[in-house]
Image (cartoon, helix red, strand yellow):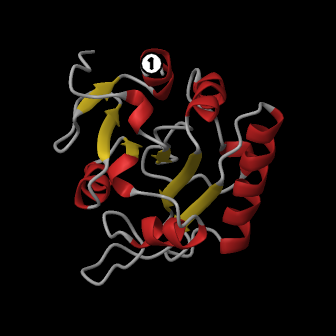
Amino acid sequence: MNYQNTNPKHYTTLFLDRDGVINRKLDNDYIKSWNAFEFETGALDALKTLRKQFKRICIVTNQQGVAKGLMTESQLMDIHRELHATLKAHYAAPDAIYYATELQSDTMQFRKPAPGMAYSALHDFPEIDFKTSIMIGDSDSDMIFGHQLGMLCISVGKKKLHHAQYHFSSLFEFSQNWIL
């Protein structure tokens, strides 16, 4: 990757999507229990490396399966408790996990690409500056979310997304190339 105009040391906060970035996304379904949660290859190692490089790490995830009645918010919170505990055991714990259970609509406030989860993070961590933040995701809504807030946007997965300044095949590849 060519980072001529990008100084990794400039970036202090990392925002991460969950499904498709940290864990494998289920086709046409939702992760409804910890038993269904499967880390992407290298994600634990990536998060351990990134934890050392960023002052703040926030997971921001759309979870409309709750609003659809496919799972409860309590089940979602159980998944996030297990995720946090597992990451903590690997010295890779995020500072916070934010989730939006809203259905996709024109009046979304928290569901990406709406900025609600970013503003919740800013409320909890007032030192966050979106201009020195990175958004990593695998969907257009992730990239729009980061772009509208002035973040550096990085897509992961099979193809580079619109609004992404850089693209990597996985979070692990990003962690191996984004060296301070």
Residue name at image x 24 percent, y 53 percent: 147
Residue lying at the far left of the rendered structure: 162
Q: Quadrant of residue 77?
A: bottom right
Q: Can you give x and y, in whole percent of width and height, for residue 133 in the image?
A: 40, 48
Q: Nearer the viewer, residue 1 or 24?
A: 1
Using the image as rendered, state which of residue 75 and residue 122 is in the foreground: 122
Q: Is residue 88 above or below residue 58?
A: above
Residue 141 x/y as whole percent: 29, 56
**In the image, residue 32 lies at what x, y percent?**
64, 57
Using the rendered view, name the quadrant where residue 80 is placed: bottom right
Vertical arrangement, residue 41 with respect to residue 119, above or below = above
With 67 as the anchor, is 80 left or right in this view?
Answer: right
Q: Residue furthest bottom?
A: 107
Residue 102 to residue 35: above or below: below
Residue at the image point whose x is 77% and y is 56% from the top:
81
Tell me the residue at 66%/52% (across/down): 95
Q: Which residue is mark 1?
A: 173
Residue 135 can be seen, yes or no: yes
Residue at 61%, 31% (x, y): give it: 47
Amino acid type of the residue tagged 1 in the rendering:
Glu
Residue 65 seen in this snapshot: no
